[in-house]
Image (cartoon, helix red, strand yellow):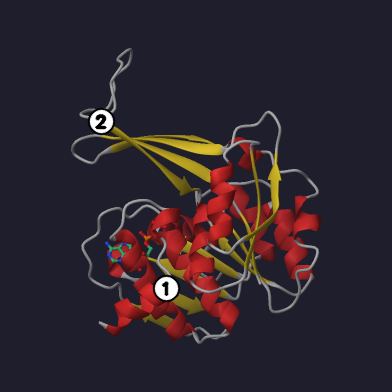
Amino acid sequence: TIYNLGSINIDHVYRLAALPRVGETISSLDHALGLGGKGANQSVAAARAGAQVRHLGAMGTGDDWVLDMLGAAGIDTGAVARLDGVATGHAIILVDAEGENSIILHGGANRALPAGLVTGGLAAIGPGDILMMQNETTLQAEAAAHARAAGARVIYSAAPFEIAALRAVLPHVSILAVNEVEARDTFAAFGEALPIAGLLITRGAKGAEYRDLETGRIWEQPAFRVQAVDTTGAGDCFAGWFAAGLSRGEDIATTLRNASAAAALQVTRKGAGNAMPTRAEVAAFLAQ
Ligand code: ADP
């Protein structure tokens, strides 16, 4: 099983002729609702990759469609707490005619996880299981320590990047997942000889690389060439597929290739969580 302690967000995307200036009111050209949050994105990606996923997180009391969508992807939402008087995490995304954006992120319930979530949500975790985490919720260090003590592997996406948060979880991390910018920030703060088993670095259209830090072996995976429409959630798609591959016991090369194909497909579609491809879609893409 893949356990994922992570954010659940609702993305509101408003298309505008121009971004509003101070004091200005602007009518939106349209509005799209989508599932977002790095946590939910990764859970959907891993579930569509065929993994059994249990999501640990929190939401407000409304917004049942979000839970329905996670459930429809096959995700176990039994450890998603519903909090009274707290908003479900959401992002207000403004996009102008040139495609430039301004984003307001409200953490809401993601930043108010109940303390019992870790012990309750991870009660059954054990060797062979994986815990995924990102940096959009609370309780990561506690969850990671719990998972490692139970013999599970921990994959941590250091995003949004924060040195203090990374320092707190690093002793419990098995595999660190970062994009190119986060990799640079990580190396600047901690050096390249990290005290973990593996490091996954994604480099957008330039591909990805996995370093086994115990043996020094490096795998390079080029990106597939596609016409990108919306790269939101590409890293989450890659991370979810990567975890699913490891969870199935696939070798690193196969796992990286599948994750790269999945992320390539994901960026050809609008949206984040909604845009995660299925195993059948990835197989068809690779068979082309
Ligand atoms: P993040 O979204 O976390 O910044 P990246 O931008 O590194 O992550 O993207 C993650 C992965 O998604 C890349 O390693 C690559 O496999 C895939 N990807 C991202 N952008 C493109 C693109 N334009 N074309 C093809 N694949 C892409």
| 146 in relation to 24, above or below | below
Report the residue marked by disc 2.
29
What residue is rendered at 57% in x and 39% in y? 63
Whether residue 208 is visible to the viewer of this picture, yes or no, is no
**Foreground of the two, 203 or 136:** 136
Mark 2 burial class by Cα count in 10 Å: few <14, some 14-19, many 20+: few
Report the residue marked by disc 1.
259
- For the N terminus, which image quadrant? bottom right
- For marks 1 and 2 on the same chain, the one whose residue lies earlier in the sequence: 2
Mark 1 burial class by Cα count in 10 Å: few <14, some 14-19, many 20+: many
Relative image position of residue 117 (x, y in whole percent): 76, 51
**Foreground of the two, 147 or 53:** 53
| Element assignment for label 1 | helix
Q: Quadrant of ligand 1?
A: bottom left
CB of mark 2 near ligand 1 (< 8 Å): no
Q: What amino acid type is highlighted by mark number 2?
A: Leu
Left or right: residue 170 versus residue 161 is right
Q: Residue furthest top?
A: 23
Relative image position of residue 17 (x, y in whole percent): 20, 29
Q: Are marks 1 and 2 in contact (CB under 8 Å)?
A: no
CB of mark 1 near ligand 1 (< 8 Å): yes
Q: CA distance from mark 1 to mark 2?
A: 35 Å
| 99 in relation to 132, above or below | above
What residue is rendered at 80% in x and 63% in y? 123
